[in-house]
Amino acid sequence: MSVAVAVRPVNDGPKEIRSIVSDAIDPIVRKIDREGHYPEGALRELGEAGAFSRHAVQSPSTGLPAAVADMATISEVCMSTGFCTWCQDALVWYLASSENTGLRKRLLDRVAGGEQLGGTGLSNPMKSFSGIEKLALRGEKVSGGYQVSGRLPWVSNIGPNNIFAAIFELSDGRRVMSVVNANASGVKLSHSSEFIALEGTGTYTVLLKDTFIPNDEVISEDVAEFIPKIRQGFVLLQFGMGLGLARGVANNMVKQVATARNAQWLPLTPNMILDRVSELEATAVQLAVSSGDTSRGAFLDVLRARLKVAELAMSAAQSGALQAGASGYMIGSESNRRQREALFMGILTPSVKHITTELARG
């Protein structure tokens, strides 16, 4: 992937990522988790500090691991905010990979810098490519663009002023990927479900009715060719959520001095968790080097590693809860939140079920 336009440079100055996490996210973690608060202000600060631009200003081999590292730092404290970061990162990845130079010039800087927030919108399409679901959106070619209708469930990191990516199918079977403005005519956002976690992630069901998508909002006119170029980065970026959560759990276990002395019987001790995090971080670095490889074999390698990240996050959270004992079984406890967040790593597209299906196909 090459980026032909300048992107706001990374700024590790006064708004360095870890400081933002400590000052702007940690104090409102409970509000995000229990009240469904969307951390818009913190996300904009993270964007200004460069958290969403690593993989746009650097080559994929160095930029993707850097983006994963920032996301892990955020997810150590709050995986809801880490997930919003991934949504933003994924949108940056699509825009940076697009051949629509006008779209890149107009949007890439703004999205990478956190000025324009947005979501990925590819959960349903990624499942449809594997035959798990039918593609939700249908479009038709009209003068100056496309007219799109359908229902897209569970698009995250969006709101009335945000944007998201979408893929729709034309009557001739061709699939097109575009940016959609949440405030465009014919677009309606609705809350249809209440989740056990990650309620503060700006997640909506999106209804589109004869929504006009102008040509200059098109990311790719040929999704069949475009998706293999971006799918490895799409999945690889998710590592930051699971690895950060696992590291956060391990650190919290170490702080619990009274129970930590008896932690050797746990499925995973803090040191075991941290060792596995380091191993998977190294794997992410290796996989990033070949992120432009469009072969199925290369993609399956990423899926295998992504499965290990999900398994580690869920196992680490369980060990943390077991060490905490009864105090971790209470609503509002750190252990309770971490278990709920970790389960999300198992169902986030590509889910464990999705990944194992693809691996079985070979």
Image (cartoon, rainbow, N blue to C red):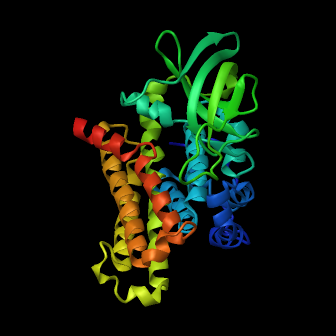
Q: Residue 150, how many percent across, how many down?
A: 59, 21
> Does the rendering let one see residue 150?
yes
Q: Residue 101, how many percent across, how many down?
A: 65, 32
**Looking at this view, is 10 or 259 the one in front?**
259
- Count of marks overlaid on the render: 0
Residue at x-position 75% and y-position 49%: 115
Q: Is residue 302 above or below residue 357?
A: below
Q: Quadrant of residue 85?
A: bottom right
Q: Is residue 28 left or right of residue 77?
A: right
Q: Is residue 125 left or right of residue 319?
A: right
Residue at x-position 57% and y-position 30%: 152
Q: Residue 188, how many percent across, how many down?
A: 70, 29
Q: Quadrant of residue 26?
A: bottom right
> Does the rendering let one see residue 362?
no
Residue at x-position 75% and y-position 27%: 184
Q: Is residue 139 above or below residue 265?
A: above
Q: Is residue 189 left or right of residue 259?
A: right
Q: Residue 313, how many percent across, how many down?
A: 41, 62
Q: Quadrant of residue 353?
A: top left
Q: Is residue 254 left or right of residue 75?
A: left
Work out which quarter of the rendered image holds the C terminus and state it: top left
**Looking at this view, is 209 or 167 the one in front?**
209
Residue at x-position 44% and y-position 40%: 231
